[in-house]
Amino acid sequence: MSTGTLDRMIEEVKGLSAEERRRLIEILSEDQRSPEQEKRDRMAQSIRGKYKHVLTGSEEFARRKAEEIALEERR
C-alpha cells in the first residue's frame, strides 16, 4: 500500500462519526483466521509440549532410525 493511499485512509477515518469509528475498531479487532487455520491452531496447541520429556539429540535420533530401518530390512 502506498503512503498516499494510507494517508487518504487515515483522513477518511478521522472524518468518521464516533459510532462509525467504534464499528471500524470492532471489525479490525475481529479474528481474521479461516476455520481451517483455527482448526490447525487448536491442533498445534493441543500437542505443544507433548514430547518435552524426551531428551534426545539429533545424532541419537538418527541412530535409532538407522536401527529401525535395519530391523525392517531384515524382516
Image: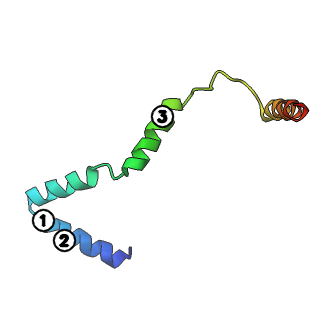
Q: Position of residue 73 (x, y in %)?
A: 88, 35
Q: Which residue is mark 1?
A: 16
Which dot, 1 or 3, sits closer to the camera?
3
Given residues 36 and 59, the one toward you in this image is: 36
Q: Position of residue 10 (x, y in %)?
A: 24, 68
Given residues 48 and 65, the one toward you in this image is: 65
Q: Residue at x 48, y 34 (%)?
A: 45
For the N terminus, give its image quadrant: bottom left
Q: Which residue is mark 3?
A: 45
Three-letter code, disc 2: Glu
Question: Tag 1: Cα neighbours inside 10 Å, few (<14), some, or many (≥20)?
Answer: few
Image: 53 above or below 6: above
What's the CA distance linking mark 3 and mark 2?
A: 39 Å
Which dot, 3 or 2, sits closer to the camera?
3
Image: 39 above or below 2: above
Q: Residue at x 42, y 48 (%)?
A: 36
Contact between labelled residues 2 and 1, with CB atoms less than 8 Å apart: yes
Q: Position of residue 32 (x, y in %)?
A: 34, 53
Q: Residue at x 53, y 31 (%)?
A: 47
Q: Which residue is mark 2?
A: 12
Given residues 75 and 14, the one toward you in this image is: 75
Three-letter code, disc 3: Gln
Q: How is the image coloured?
A: rainbow
The secondary structure type at the circle numbered 2 is: helix
Contact between labelled residues 3 and 1, with CB atoms less than 8 Å apart: no
